Structure formats: C-alpha cells, structure tokens
Image: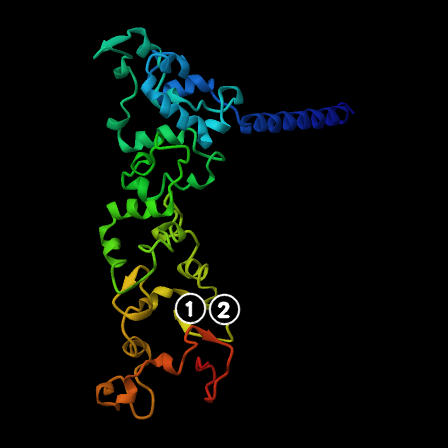
Amino acid sequence: MVLGRTGPVLLLGLAALVVAVFSGCAEMQASKPIIPVREYEKLIAGRLDADYVGDQACLTKCHEHDTYKKYLDASTMGAQLSPESGLPLVNCESCHGPGSLAIQNIKMVNGKETCDFETFIDLKDLPNEAQSLICLKCHTANATFNLHNWNAGTHNMSGVSCFDCHNVHQGADLKLHPSQVTVLCYKCHPYVKSEFMLPTHHAVNEGRVSCLDCHDLHGSPTEKQLKEATVKEVCTSCHAEKEGPFAFEHGDVMEDCRNCHVPHGSVNNSLLTARQPFLCFQCHGSNHGTGTAANVLTEQPRRFTKCTDCHSEIHGTDNPGRFSTGGSFLR
C-alpha cells in the first residue's frame, strides 16, 4: 500500500521535472545578447580601453567629415537604426571603433584641429576576413537575409571583403547599380570579360543583363554561386519558352543548357558550343538516308545545312511529327 501511494507522487515529480527541463531549453533558445551590445561592439572593434562618445563629439572638431555623416544618415542603415532601437549602433563608431581616446588629445595640424585618428581601427590594413566581420556584425541573420551563405561562399573563401565592392561613404544609396556590378566583376574576372567580347554574348556590356541576374555575389549553395538550384532554372527564368514540360523533350540536353550553349559568350550563333550541324553530329551523327557519322564528310551539301532549319523546336515540342518515331522537334 505504501508503494501504491508513492506512485502518483513520483509521476507528478517526473512531470514537474520534464516541464522544468523544457522550460530551461526554451530559455536557452531565446534570442538575447550574452553581453550588452555596446560591450560586444567594443570586443569586435578590439578597443576595450576606449568608450563611445557619439558622432557629435567627433564631428564638432572635424567638419570635413560632415558630408560622410549626412550620407550615412540618409542611407538605409542610418535612417532605420538608432541607438534607441536596441539594435547594434549605426554611426561612425560602429565601424571605426570607440572614439574617446581620439578626442582626448586634440592636435593642431596645418592650423586645423584634428583628433588622434591613430586610435581608431585601421580598417584598410585589417585582414579581409576582419574587414567583412565589421559589416557582418550587423548584416547577418534577419538583418540581411541573403548573407547567410557568405561565410561558405566563393568570394569569402577567396579573400574578398565587403570593402572591395561597397563604399559606405559614397552616398545615400549603398547598393550598387547593375552597371557598377559589371565593372567590379571584370576587375577580378578578366577571362569572363573576354567571353562577353565574343560575337554572340549575353547583353551584359550593353547594360540589358547583369551578373546579378544569374549569380548571387554574396554566396550560394549551388555551383558558380547561381541564384537557382540548377543551371536550367537560371536560364528559364528569362527563357521561359524553353522550360517545358513538353510531350517530346530533347533527352538529357534538357537537364543542363550548357550541353549545347556557353553561358557568357561564343564565336557561334546562339551561344552554341559548336556550329551546326556539327554540334548535333556529336550525339546523332548524320542519320538522313545513307549518311553516318563515319562518312559525313562525303554526304551531299544538303547534309550541311542547319538542323534547326527543319527541327526548329529543338528544345522540345508537343507536335508528334510525321515520322513513325514521333516527336521530331518539327514546327
């Protein structure tokens, strides 16, 4: 009888323990800073011996930076975030570090008062990864959702920093225009630039297409930092008429457009990897009449016209065609 009485007590105790454990887990999962945000920023900045003094304390002695401050205030960062928001600070000290040491010893240089700027973070001499960390302390998680692939992205792994493409002081709009993106990409990718100089190419140089239309420059889990899961999905985002599904599809070619096309530029029409009909002969040979791949050079001149003169719907068709096999990609 004693054991019978303790049974419910044990069950209640076990239930209370389970509730306490899950409550503790929920508390651990709650989003909260380990240390105050300002102390965290000082840790990132590497200046634990200095304190924040605010922009005004800096700008009152150094008016040449007023323009930079106006740009920052007018930007997305400066307009939306403020110290009162509880979010990471967005001001001069957010990037350059706490400024109390800089204004302790105001100096006269060429008749002008200037702060001791050597006490600030030397941003230009920081390693590329550390430069990006200055930006990523704010631009992570929900702040900038398309940066969640940055750390494992090709650019970060290759030593490219945010500073290589973005200039916080350039103006109110910190985003880059597509034409600016092309110039930036060409600086590091001269081979790709040469491909866009070929006779047929995507209209990047003409400004109608941008690198951003196909690639996510901040990182992507796909190859070549593509914006979609597959090459075909990237291509059909513009060339929707090639997507299908079709009743008769062009075999494995439909899986990857690069089986026949070069993405950036080509010496052949339509960005083809080889001229017609030789591109088609790589898989089909010449199967019209008596011709074969082995004796294709001895065929009649009509064999060397473009295959797409007849098979115009080469990507896929719903037309069964006039041959017994059906689906001959005819118009």
- Residue 273: image location, x then y, percent: 28, 68
- Residue 21: image location, x then y, percent: 60, 27
Question: Would you place residue 157 above or below residue 260 in this image?
Answer: above
Question: Would you place residue 324 above or below residue 4 in this image?
Answer: below
Near-viewer residue (43 or 202): 202
Q: Which residue is mark 2?
A: 244
- Residue 41: image location, x then y, percent: 40, 21
Residue at 35% of width from left, 19% of height from top?
Answer: 97
Q: How many marks?
A: 2
The label shown at residue 21 is none
Question: Would you place residue 95 above or below residue 143 in this image?
Answer: above
Q: Residues within 10 Å of mark 2 (few under 14, many from 20)?
A: some
Residue at 34% of width from left, 17% of height from top?
Answer: 63
Give the quadrant of residue 156.
top left
Q: Hey, which residue is sitting farthest right in the picture?
A: 1
User: How far, Cα to Cα, is label 2 from label 1?
Assistant: 9 Å
Q: Decide which of tag 2 and tag 1 comes sooner along the chain.
A: 2
Q: Hey, which residue is sitting farthest bottom in the picture?
A: 290
Coloring scheme used: rainbow
User: Closer to the camera: disc 2 or disc 1?
Assistant: 2
Q: Secondary structure at mark 1?
A: helix
**Would residue 15 appear left or right of 123 to someone viewing this image?**
right
Three-letter residue code for mark 1: Met
Asked if labels 1 and 2 touch by Cβ distance under 8 angstroms, the answer is yes
The label shown at residue 254 is 1
The quadrant in which the N terminus is found is top right
Three-letter residue code for mark 2: Gly
- Residue 291: image location, x then y, percent: 29, 89
Question: Would you place residue 21 above or below residue 321 in this image?
Answer: above
Q: Secondary structure at mark 2?
A: loop
Q: Residues within 10 Å of mark 1 (few under 14, many from 20)?
A: some
